[in-house]
Every structure is written in structure tokens, then in C-alpha cells.
Amino acid sequence: MLKTWIEDFKINAQTIDSNIGISPPYVYLDQLKNILFSNDIDSIQIGSQDVDHSDGARTGAISASMLLDLGCKYTIIGHSERRSLFKEDNKIIEEKFRCLESNNIMQVLCIGESLEEMESGKTLDVLNEQITSVLKNKT
């Protein structure tokens, strides 16, 4: 699956003026890295779908240093699925943001409101809170 997808990207990546990144599930990060390397593709960056905010012993967690070992250039944080399914709040997202920042990994911050928040007219307040809570202590 990855190999076919990469071939399609390889053809198109050289004809457009933009940055391309792929964030596969963790189990495919190393495979993606090897495919890109073996096909001499440096126009596509590797990213992760999440990171743990600490570097200590956390069984099952993926740390920023592990992502660096895999060649990840960016990480998605704050995705709606992580917020809803894993109960990640703005404080946790801020900790992840700081962790990535201190490890020189680009942060891709996702923001968004729930259906209930949208229907009650709270969209702008929710989005503003998500952004300001993460960026308030930006160095």
C-alpha cells in the first residue's frame, strides 16, 4: 500500500512548489522511511500522528526522541479524535507543543469544535481558547 502511494507522490512531488509530508500510523513510519530512502525521494517529509509529552518511561508511548530517530520532521497534535477519544485537553496539547518545540520538531496544531459547541454558537470561543492556551507561553 505505502509503496504504490509513494510512487504516485514521487511523480507529482517534483512538479509542484510546496512541501509534502506523510503521517502514517506509527507501525509504518520505519517502512515509509526506508521506501523514501531506497527510492531517493527527499521531497517528501515524514511526520507522526501524535507524540507523548514526556521522555520518561511510558509504556506504549512514542517520545519526541523516538520520532527523531525515525526521521520525523513534524507531528500532528490536537486532532479531534485525540481530544475526544483520549480526552486530551488544551493543557496536554500545550505540553506536547512544548516537547516538540524543544526537540525541533515542527508542530501541526489541529483545532476544532464539537457539534454541540458549534450548534450553541461557541465555535470562535473554542477555537480561540485552543490556540491561545497553546501559544500563550510560546518562546
Image (cartoon, rainbow, N blue to C red):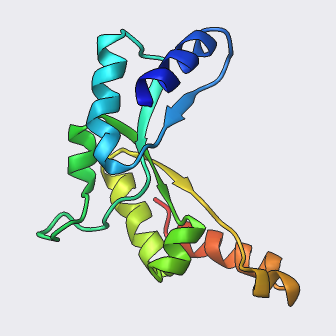
Q: In the displayed structure, would residue 17 be above or below residue 139?
A: above
Q: Could you say which quadrant of the image residue 99 lies in?
A: bottom left
Q: 103 left or right of 57? A: right
Q: 101 left or right of 78? A: left
Q: Quadrant of the N terminus?
A: top left
Q: Could you say which quadrant of the image residue 20 lies in?
A: top right
Q: In the displayed structure, would residue 131 be above or below residue 47?
A: below
Q: How many marks?
A: 0
> What percent of the width, then of the height, locates residue 41?
42, 14
> What percent of the width, then of the height, locates residue 73?
39, 37
Q: 71 left or right of 124? A: left
> What percent of the width, then of the height, locates residue 48?
40, 48
Residue drawn at x 87%, y 85% as measured from the top left: 119
* Residue 136, visible in the rendered structure: no
> What percent of the width, then of the height, locates residue 85?
49, 78
Nearer to the camera, 82 or 3: 3
Nearer to the camera, 122 or 87: 87
Residue drawn at x 21%, y 49% as measured from the top left: 65
Residue drawn at x 36%, y 10% as measured from the top left: 39
Q: In the displayed structure, would residue 107 be above or below residue 52?
A: above
Residue drawn at x 56%, y 64% as measured from the top left: 79
Q: In the displayed structure, would residue 58 be above or below residue 2?
A: below
